[in-house]
Image: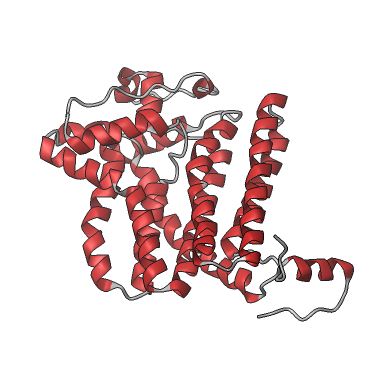
Amino acid sequence: MISNRPIRFYSVEKLTFIYIIVTSLIILFLKPGVHIARELLGIRILMVCMIFSLAYLNSVKNWMIIRFSRFAFVGALLVYWYPETFDINRMIPNYDHLLAALEQNIFSFQPSLVFSQLYPQRWISEIFNMGYFAYYPLIVGTSLYFYLKDRKFFEYFFFTILFSFFCYYTIYILFPTAGPQYYFQAIGLDQAHAGTFPHVGYYFDRHQELLPACSNSGFFSQMVQNTQQVGERPTAAFPSSHVGISTLILILIIKNRRYLLFACLLPIYTALVMATVYIQAHYVIDVIAGFSTAFAFFFLGSLAYKEFTRKYYGIPELSAIFLKVPVKVRN
């Protein structure tokens, strides 16, 4: 197939390219083993090739299914980017001892250990676990909603969400924290209750054991536990992206004046936020940081989106810039 139109990249694709470049530089700076570096960088090359292939195919056939697939592909990559933060940050010492000590100084105890003990009732546990489990359906559901209802706002919505994810993942790589469910298992509950929080260094490079799950056998409790056993890693505690991204989604819903949708999602959001501490995935400090950074990333993401969409460069335009050939750039 030969394309008669120039290859143009969506803003989310260009954003993904930037994240790939930034994380590739971090990987090279950390100097991992040859096998690890080859695997991490090789996967990135495949991702770039896939994005180029979809963009080229779209230049040949401007079908809706291809356009949708381009958004879906960069969104689906989040399933890979999250656990990969652990593959990279395991080369850096863990910092959970700082968060746990700060939490102890503020509250004089560890809320993540006390919360579920105060409210062990099955129905309360199910509500919180339902909220926590709703995180990814919330992202996918609202994205599809805006894709079908308001295509122009969807592009801004999706870009801002992806921008925030990449900001969080970069923090997770450079500031490795595992969260209470991993850290307290590593140091022992006796030390955690006593307010002693030793530095575990590279402990999680070889150990990924979680605190024992509570005895609650409710449907959503089991779903969360099964999900954690399969896809969870000792990474991404501070700030809480669960809180940050879900807060950002509500901000964007309000910005689009979908007040009924906001009202429907608010109870789920509230349960989700509380669940992050209830199931011992996060410290309260992580929740506060996640909520605060949601507003910061909303502002920065909006600015970045304006910059990315101000001029729409494709392959011919970029080539012309490097070759210093005058070309008319479409606004």
For residue 12, above or below residue 108: below
Q: How many marks?
A: 0
Question: Quadrant location of residue 282?
Answer: top left
- Can you say which quadrant of the picture contains the N terminus? bottom right
- Can you say which quadrant of the picture contains the C terminus? bottom right
For residue 80, above or below residue 295: above
For residue 158, above or below residue 235: below
Question: Quadrant location of residue 262?
Answer: bottom left
**Color theme of the render:** secondary structure
Between residue 215 and residue 45, name the one nearer to us.
45
- Residue 71 in picture, x, y percent from top left: 51, 59
Between residue 241 and residue 310, name the one nearer to us.
310
- Residue 72 in picture, x, y percent from top left: 49, 55
- Residue 288 in picture, x, y percent from top left: 37, 50
- Residue 45 in picture, x, y percent from top left: 68, 43
Q: Residue at x 29, y 31 (%)?
A: 225
In this rendering, position of residue 200 left or right of residue 18:
left
Is residue 115 in view? no
Q: Residue at x 52, y 69 (%)?
A: 302
In this rendering, position of residue 164 left or right of residue 131:
right
Question: Quadrant location of residue 201?
Answer: top right
For residue 101, above or below residue 322: above
Is residue 66 in view? yes
Q: Residue at x 66, y 67 (%)?
A: 8
Taking the view exactly as shown, the residue that stands out farthest to the front is 1
In this rendering, position of residue 260 left or right of residue 248:
left
Q: Residue at x 78, y 69 (%)?
A: 316
